[in-house]
Image: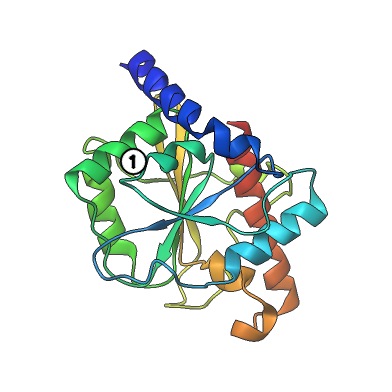
Amino acid sequence: MRRLIGLFLLAMLLTAIPALAQDPFSLRIARIKYGGGGDWYGDEQSLWELLAFARRETLMDVAPREDVVELGSDKLYSYPYVYLTGHGNVRFSDDEARRLRHYLEGGGFLHIDDNYGLDRHIRREMKKVFPDQEFVELPFDHPIYHAHFDFPAGLPKIHMHDGEPAQGFGLIVEGRLVAFYSYESDLGDGWEPKEVHNVPDPLRSAALRMGVNLLSYAMSH
């Protein structure tokens, strides 16, 4: 099955080669546009800021803006990292859930960033993707917390929300972390320009550094 998925993903990538050959950047990421009514477009400038920080602080040749991709699009398979955020409802069709599973099993990486109010919806929809899998909290020594910058205490807490501790959950398939879920943290608020949410500089720096870890991990695993 994994060989078939690998061949499918290779075919998808080959269809994208003409466009990629004209792209001056070696790495592009995407934001997932989903159905259900939730604000998939939340924290509009967050990824722009993260990508600019990654270009300054690392050797990653990332594009300055993210793309927007729907799960039903074949373009999904051309991104090493896709980002999903929002406050409200999320709905995946059966076909979208199947495609997301193929993407993740074939080497893709999903970062889910709860912008407050997403939790029960995304947990329900990810059950469509991996019915037999559960999110597990990752230990603080997991490589994702040390991929570029060190976070010995795990995920940083950026926005207060309910005052609960920030938690980093993962979906692990055949020994590989395929999805990271940042919960009660709201990294996207920290990535936004400072004037948007008035996040203190130390917290904003922590959010951006954790974002670089996520990108680094996605690119190397």
Is residue 141 visible in this depiction of the protein? no
44 vs 171, left or right, is right
Return the residue nearer the eye: 147 or 14.
Answer: 14
Q: Is residue 155 left or right of residue 36?
A: right
- Please state which amino acid type lies under the numbered disc 1: Leu
Name above or below for residue 139 compared with residue 9: below
Percent from the top left, x then y, of residue 81?
Answer: 53, 44
Judging from the image, what secondary structure is the residue with disc 1 in? helix
Q: Which residue is mark 1?
A: 100
Q: Position of residue 23 (x, y in %)?
A: 66, 43
* Residue 102 seen in the figure: yes
Q: Quadrant of residue 73?
A: top left
Quadrant position of residue 35? bottom left
Q: Is residue 185 left or right of residue 134?
A: right
Q: Residue at x 51, y 68 (%)?
A: 186
Identity of the residue drawn at 42% across and 42% down = 76
